[in-house]
């Protein structure tokens, strides 16, 4: 019987940039003329948000946020290396990158061959790497790598095909792909997971299976899964994401498949939690930290019923669309009878989203 490791990380794009750019999403909101002045006034912000902003527009706060995130990322990488998997399955969203108007699959197993990707040459707007971006992208990366820098990514097509076959045979109507659709490399949910787990640049030798979930649902085309002006609220929306219950159950089936496979597998949820830029109620200025804390406590307590029974509307109201990536991990851990053996919650108001790292050891 195979062994399975559960992991969770964030793929927050500004982590790849400089400390002085870490708060660029919030700075974009401050430039939006339709955000009321009182919402922009730091005097009206929560105390932690004021502290993070400081007297330098978030530069020192950005440096601290980086270290807070790296604490979890390095812990997860250590657990990954100690486990030494045959395969790393990464659940991630696609923010109008590889899938656009031509097709939006609810689920897609990317059964790719090994790839050579250019992290900075291939990245699109949603990854905040474009050179001209009104809302805060295009800044130099923390590693000093160029647009021509190439990264070798190992993939595991054979196991990906086996996984897709099993899911289809068990009535989960997943799509599959042998090559990228509209994105020349890997969408940032997957690419950043590799870049961040290899933050210290010691190499990432593990073959991956990128597993796309349509987290952005109603906003994936209408808002291109990314930041927009407040005046754009009210655009006609797209059909929704799969429900949390369906994603949870899919994660459980993935666990059942790998449990009977010959592989040592790490199952990775890749995303931050509540995203400020998705919450109109706060003028897209602040995330729903309290809801994140509720879900975090439920995760730590292995209260998987709370996870599985969350209405999609509740996740959307909290800006927690990307929590669906963690919903798949929750379903897998519930199926395996796992509890969280280590976790970290990074609370923030200034830096767009709560960051959670987690380890579920065999």
Image: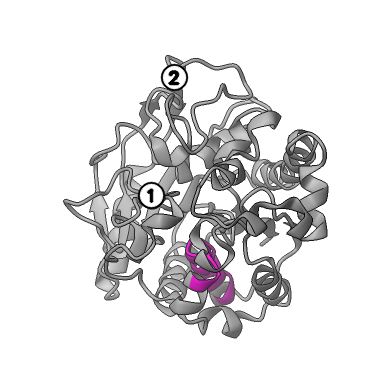
Q: Is residue 93 above or below residue 241?
A: above
Relative horizontal placement of residue 277, taking residue 359 as reference (left or right): left
Read off the residue under disc 1: 95
Marks 2/1 in contact by CB < 8 Å: the verdict is no
Residue drawn at (37%, 54%) of the image: 212
Q: What is the x, y in percent for residue 225?
A: 39, 52
| Residue corresponding to mark 2 | 150
Q: Nearer the viewer, residue 38 or 11?
A: 38
**Residue that lies at the very extreme toward the left in this rendered image:** 102
Q: At 30% from the left edge and 57% from the top edge, which residue is drawn?
A: 222
User: Horizontal and vertical percent for residue 58?
Assistant: 74, 39
The stretch of residues the image draws in magenta is 317-334
Q: Main secondary structure of the magenta part?
A: helix
Crowd tier of the residue under label 2, counting other residues whose Cα lies within 10 Å: few below 14, some 14–19, many 20 or above: some
Closer to viewer: mark 2 or mark 1: 1
Task: Count all numbered tags in the image, as a single digit.
Answer: 2
Residue 27 at x, y percent in the picture: 60, 41
Q: Does residue 343 show up? A: no
- Residue 278 seen: yes
Say whether residue 327 is magenta.
yes
- Residue 26 placement (x, y as % from top left): 61, 46
């Amino acid at each position: 019987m195979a062994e399975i490791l559960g992991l969770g990380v964030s793929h927050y794009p500004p982590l790849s940039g400089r400390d002085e750019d870490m708060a660029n999403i919030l700075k974009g909101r401050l430039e939006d003329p339709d955000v009321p002045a009182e919402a922009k006034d730091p005097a009206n912000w929560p105390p932690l948000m004021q502290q993070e902003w400081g007297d330098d527009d978030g530069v020192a706060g950005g440096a601290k946020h980086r270290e807070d995130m790296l604490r979890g990322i390095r812990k997860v990488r250590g657990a990954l290396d100690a486990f030494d998997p045959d395969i790393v399955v990464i659940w991630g969203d696609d923010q109008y990158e590889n899938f656009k108007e031509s097709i939006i699959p609810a689920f897609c197993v990317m059964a790719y061959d090994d790839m050579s990707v250019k992290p900075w040459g291939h990245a699109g707007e949603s990854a905040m790497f474009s050179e001209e971006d009104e809302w805060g992208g295009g800044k130099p990366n923390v590693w000093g790598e160029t647009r021509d820098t190439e990264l070798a990514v190992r993939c595991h097509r054979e196991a990906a095909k086996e996984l897709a076959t099993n899911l289809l045979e068990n009535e989960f109507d997943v799509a599959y792909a042998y090559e990228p659709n509209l994105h020349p490399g890997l969408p940032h949910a997957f690419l950043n997971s590799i870049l961040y787990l290899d933050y210290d640049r010691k190499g990432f030798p593990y073959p991956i299976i990128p597993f796309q979930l349509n987290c952005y649902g109603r906003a994936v085309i209408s808002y291109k899964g990314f930041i927009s002006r407040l005046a754009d609220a009210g655009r006609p929306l797209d059909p929704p994401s799969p429900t949390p219950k369906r994603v949870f159950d899919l994660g459980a089936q993935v666990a059942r498949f790998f449990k009977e496979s010959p592989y040592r597998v790490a199952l990775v949820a890749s995303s931050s939690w509540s995203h400020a830029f998705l919450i109109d109620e706060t003028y897209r200025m602040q995330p729903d930290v309290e809801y994140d804390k509720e879900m975090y406590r439920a995760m730590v307590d292995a209260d998987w019923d709370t996870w599985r029974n969350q209405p999609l509307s509740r996740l959307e109201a909290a800006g927690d669309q990307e929590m669906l990536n963690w919903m798949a991990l929750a379903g897998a851990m519930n199926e395996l009878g796992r509890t969280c053996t280590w976790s970290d919650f990074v609370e923030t108001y200034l830096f767009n989203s709560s960051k959670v790292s987690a380890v579920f050891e065999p």
